[in-house]
Image (tube, rainbow, N blue to C red):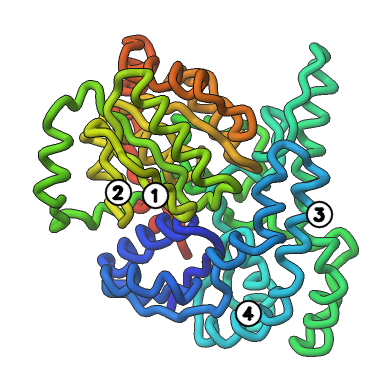
């Protein structure tokens, strides 16, 4: 039984759903382990599911979760708030994940599911870490996603800092939980203590999958030998999905001036203020807009006819084909869906790796200069919306990138690499 463990938001789940379906279709037994709230998505594709009690939405809505989301580009605040958010649930996850993964012959796990590595060592089975962003696997080419960017015009310094940023991320993920993990390894699993700096030297020598496109982030030549960028893992399970007639009519009015605006799992600190800003910007820029309420539950009274408020799930693989551009938070999943659809993106990152993806979209020429959520104003949002529907250069570049991504098959490549 191949077990897939992911802990995080809806965007963290989606690639694992795609891989689960690919494995199932290839005849390999697979089960998905993640938050219980995501059970319906696993049932839709017909794979075994084990639910965990930790609720990502509740965590993000908590005081510590809100503080984490407000960390923006402050590394110290990001780390401190991540530890506050994660520590209370860590011990509970120790027992839940062990039970959930029992009977596995192979485990694939995301960053916050790293306990899997120790269980796999105990059981004598392979375990493969999956990254949705370049956050581990050190390289001199660029810093770890979510890290500050330093370029002082001294190449040796920049390359050295870039490499150091990955070591720093490793220790952020290890040291706060080291004592609990060491006790669990020795007293419960009967394993020897890990080295003081953690298991990362070993992890760099075994297969690690990066589930994003080498078109978007070229694979570094100096990566550890086990690291491979497979291409994005897309789930095309929306063949039977049908939009409401009212929604279809809205989209048909003027596709060339219609944009999507949505911030996914970001539980915004000021949702009403943000929603009101969006309404004003749509009016000011003259575009039409599909507004996704998302986990922030963006709502506004007296919406103009140029805005369609969508409160439920709509497959991005379908929706983004219908619009001229995408405004989003820079989550790995939404970024990949927008680029694959060949649509320019105006990215408004909140924190962590979202700044990395925002930068990549802009550097690739597939979108306007990003604006951090804390710096977003009516004027910058209006300008971004206008550019999405009028700038032929970014439209053409986004379309070219989309064509390249559409030729990749990340799920197939990942399955071919599995033992």
Which mark is drawn over residue 310?
2
* Among numbered discs 3 and 1, the one appearing first in the sequence: 3
Q: Residues within 10 Å of mark 1 (few under 14, many from 20)?
A: many
Tag 2–tag 1 contact (CB < 8 Å)? yes
> Label 3, label 1: how many angstroms apart (C-alpha)?
29 Å
> Label 2, label 1: how many angstroms apart (C-alpha)?
6 Å
Which residue is denoted by mark 3 in the rendering? 80
Q: Residues within 10 Å of mark 4 (few under 14, many from 20)?
A: few
Q: Is residue 26 left or right of residue 71?
A: left
Q: Is residue 94 left or right of residue 181?
A: left
> Label 4, label 2: how many angstroms apart (C-alpha)?
47 Å
Label 3 SS: helix
* Among numbered discs 4 and 1, the one appearing first in the sequence: 4
Q: Residues within 10 Å of mark 3 (few under 14, many from 20)?
A: some
Tag 3–tag 1 contact (CB < 8 Å)? no
Q: Where, by quadrant of the figure, is residue 56 drawn?
A: bottom right
Label 2 SS: strand
Q: Is residue 391 above or below residue 48?
A: above
Which residue is denoted by mark 4 in the rendering? 124
Nearer the camera: disc 3 or disc 1? 1
Residue in front for this viewpoint, 405 or 147: 147
Instruction: Residue at 22% x, 34% y: name it.
Output: 305
Tag 4–tag 2 contact (CB < 8 Å)? no
């Amino acid at each position: 039984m191949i077990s897939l463990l992911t802990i995080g938001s809806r965007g963290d789940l989606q690639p694992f759903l795609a891989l689960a379906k690919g494995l199932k279709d290839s005849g390999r037994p697979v089960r998905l382990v993640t938050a219980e709230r995501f059970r319906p998505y696993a049932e839709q594709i017909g794979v075994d599911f084990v639910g965990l009690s930790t609720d990502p939405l509740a965590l993000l809505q908590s005081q510590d979760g809100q503080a984490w989301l407000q960390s923006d580009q402050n590394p110290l605040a990001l780390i401190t708030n991540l530890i506050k958010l994660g520590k209370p649930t860590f011990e509970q996850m120790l027992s839940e994940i062990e039970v959930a993964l029992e009977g596995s012959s192979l485990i694939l796990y995301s960053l916050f599911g790293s306990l899997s590595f120790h269980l796999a060592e105990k059981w004598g089975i392979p375990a493969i870490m999956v990254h949705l962003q370049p956050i581990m696997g050190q390289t001199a080419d660029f810093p770890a996603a979510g890290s500050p960017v330093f370029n002082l015009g001294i190449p040796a310094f920049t390359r050295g800092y870039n490499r150091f940023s990955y070591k720093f991320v490793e220790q952020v993920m290890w040291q706060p939980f080291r004592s609990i993990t060491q006790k669990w390894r020795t007293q419960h699993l009967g394993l020897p203590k890990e080295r003081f700096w953690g298991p990362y030297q070993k992890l760099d020598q075994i297969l690690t999958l990066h589930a994003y496109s080498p078109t978007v982030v070229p694979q570094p030549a100096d990566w550890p030998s086990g690291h491979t960028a497979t291409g994005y893992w897309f789930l095309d399970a929306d063949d039977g999905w049908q939009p409401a007639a009212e929604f279809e009519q809205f989209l048909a009015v003027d596709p060339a001036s219609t944009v999507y605006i949505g911030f996914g799992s970001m539980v915004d600190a000021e949702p009403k203020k943000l929603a009101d800003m969006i309404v004003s910007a749509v009016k000011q820029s003259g575009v039409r807009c599909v507004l996704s309420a998302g986990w922030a539950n963006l709502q506004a009274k007296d919406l103009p006819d140029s805005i369609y408020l969508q409160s439920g799930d709509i497959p991005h693989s379908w929706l983004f084909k219908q619009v001229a551009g995408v405004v989003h938070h820079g989550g790995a999943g939404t970024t990949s869906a927008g680029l694959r659809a060949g649509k320019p993106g105006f990215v408004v990152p909140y924190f962590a790796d979202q700044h990395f993806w925002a930068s990549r979209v802009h550097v690739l020429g597939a979108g306007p200069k990003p604006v951090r959520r804390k710096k977003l104003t009516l004027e910058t949002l209006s300008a971004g919306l206008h550019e999405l529907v009028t700038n032929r250069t970014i439209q053409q570049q986004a379309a070219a990138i989309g064509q390249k991504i559409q030729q990749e098959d990340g799920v197939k490549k990942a399955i071919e690499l599995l033992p």
